[in-house]
Amino acid sequence: MIWIGFGLSLVVLLGLARFSIWGAMFLGALVLGIFSLPLAEVLGVLAQVFGDLGVVALALAVGFIPLIGAALEKGGWFGPLLALIPGGRRTVFAAVPALFGLLPIPGGALLSAPILEQTGGGTPEERAAANVWFRHVLLFFYPMASPLMVGAKLAGLDLWTIIPYQIPWALLSAGLGGIFLLGPFRGPKPTRGTKPTWRSLFPVGVLLLAPVLDFLLKKWTSLPAPEVATFAALGASFLLSVYGVRLRDLPSLLRAAAPWRFSLIVAGMFLYLGVFQASGLPTRLAGLDLPLLGVVVGLGILMGVATGRQQAAVSVVIPLYLAAKGGLHPLGFSVIYQTSYLGYLLSPLHPCLTVSAQYAGTTLGAVWRRLLRPSLVLLASAIVAGLFLL
C-alpha cells in the first residue's frame, strides 16, 4: 500500500502541478499519507511543518521575491538599470535577460523581451532562445533564487556552502550560450541617448541588499533559525524596492504579485517531505538497488518538464537521493540541481519560454531547436559529473 500511495502521489504531482504547484504538493502529501500513515500521524506532520520556525520563515521570505520584482517594475526602475549596460548587441542579449532574471516573476522574460527586440539582430527564434537561456544564468548561484534556497533546506545544506559549487555551472552555461546563441548578434547596440545616473544604482542596490544582508546576519548574529536571516534580508530589500511606488498602488501590486502562491509552494514541499520521511519509504528505498544516477537525471528532467517548476523536481529528487544515500554533498547537490533545471528550462509549461516565443512571433518548436544543442552539452556534463559525484 505504501508503494501504491507513493506512485499515486507522484501522479498527483505530475498531473496537478501544471495548474497549481502548491495545491499539487499538499494533495500529493495527503495521498501519500492516507496510504502509509494513520490520520493522527499525518496531522502530526502537518503541525510539525507549520511549527518549524525555519520552514515558516523560508516560506514567508520566498513570498517577498515576486513583490520586489513587481515593485521595481511599478516604480519605473528598469530604464535606469539598463543604462548601466555597456558594449554591443551580444552584451545586451546576455546581460539584460540575466539582470532581469534576478527578479523571478512568473513569465518575467517578457520584461526583457521588448528590449531585445528593439536591440535587433538575428531571427525571432534566435532572440527568444537567447532571452530564455541567459535569463537563468545568474540564478545558478544567486543566493536568493527560490529553487536554490529551498533545495538547500531540503538537503540539509548551508546555502552559502553550496554557492561556490554552483558558480562553475553558471560559467559553463554562460559559455555555452555565448558559443551557440550569441553568434547572430554581432555589432553595436542601437544608441538610446540614456546615460547612467545615480538612479541606475538604485535597482542594483535593491538586488544586492538581500544576499549581502542575509550573509552578514548569518555570520554575525545568533538567530533561532538561519532562515530568519533570509526573511529579514528579503523583507529589507522589499521595503527599499517600494521607494517610488505610491501607497494607493500597493494593494494592486500585492494582487498582481500574488506572493502567497510562492509561500504555499514552500510549505507544500516540506509537508510532502515530512510525510515521505514518516511513511517509512526512505528505509524501503535504501534497501533497493536503484540506478541512482538514472533516477536523479530521469526523474529530475521528467518532473521539471511535466510541471514547469524546478522546485517540484528538487522536492522529489532530493528526498529520494537522501533515502538511498543518507546524505548529500554540495557537489552532488549541484548535479541534481542542473538536471532538474534542464527539465524546467525546456518545459512547455515554463512561462519564460512561452512568453518569449510569443513576443518574438515564433513557435515553441523553433525556440527548442535553438536551445537543444547547449542543453544537451549541459546535460552531458551533468551526467559525467554524476558518474563521479553521486
Image (cartoon, rainbow, N blue to C red):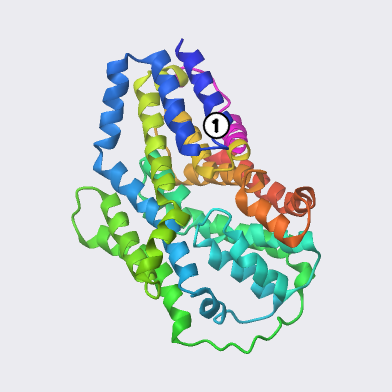
Above or below residue 162? Residue 30 is above
Instruction: Residue at 35%, 69% (x, y): give it.
Output: 247
Above or below residue 2? Residue 346 is below
User: Is residue 232 toward the left or the right of residue 266 in the image?
Assistant: left
Picture coordinates of residue 63 (x, y %)?
Answer: 39, 52
Query: Callout 1: few (<14), some (14-19), or many (20+) C-alpha neighbours within 10 Å?
Result: some
Instruction: Residue at 59%, 65% (x, y): give it.
Output: 111
Residue farthest to the top, as pictured: 1
Q: Secondary structure at mark 1?
A: helix
Q: Quadrant of residue 210?
A: bottom left
User: Is residue 249 toward the left or the right of residue 337 in the image?
Assistant: left
Is 295 magenta? The answer is: yes
Q: How would you classify the magenta stretch by its main secondary structure?
A: helix
Q: Which residues are magenta?
A: 286-303
Above or below residue 238? Residue 335 is above
Instruction: Residue at 50%, 23% (x, y): give it.
Output: 9
Residue farthest to the front, as pictured: 248
Is 127 magenta? The answer is: no
Count the marks: how many? 1
Label 1 sits on residue: 16
Does residue 385 show up? no
User: Is residue 302 toward the left or the right of residue 208 in the image?
Assistant: right
The three-letter amino acid code for the residue at tag 1 is Leu
Front residue of 188 and 324: 188
Instruction: Residue at 29%, 23% (x, y): give it.
Output: 43
Picture coordinates of residue 258 (x, y %)?
Answer: 44, 51
Above or below residue 383? Residue 4 is above
User: Is residue 76 toward the left or the right of residue 157 in the image?
Assistant: right
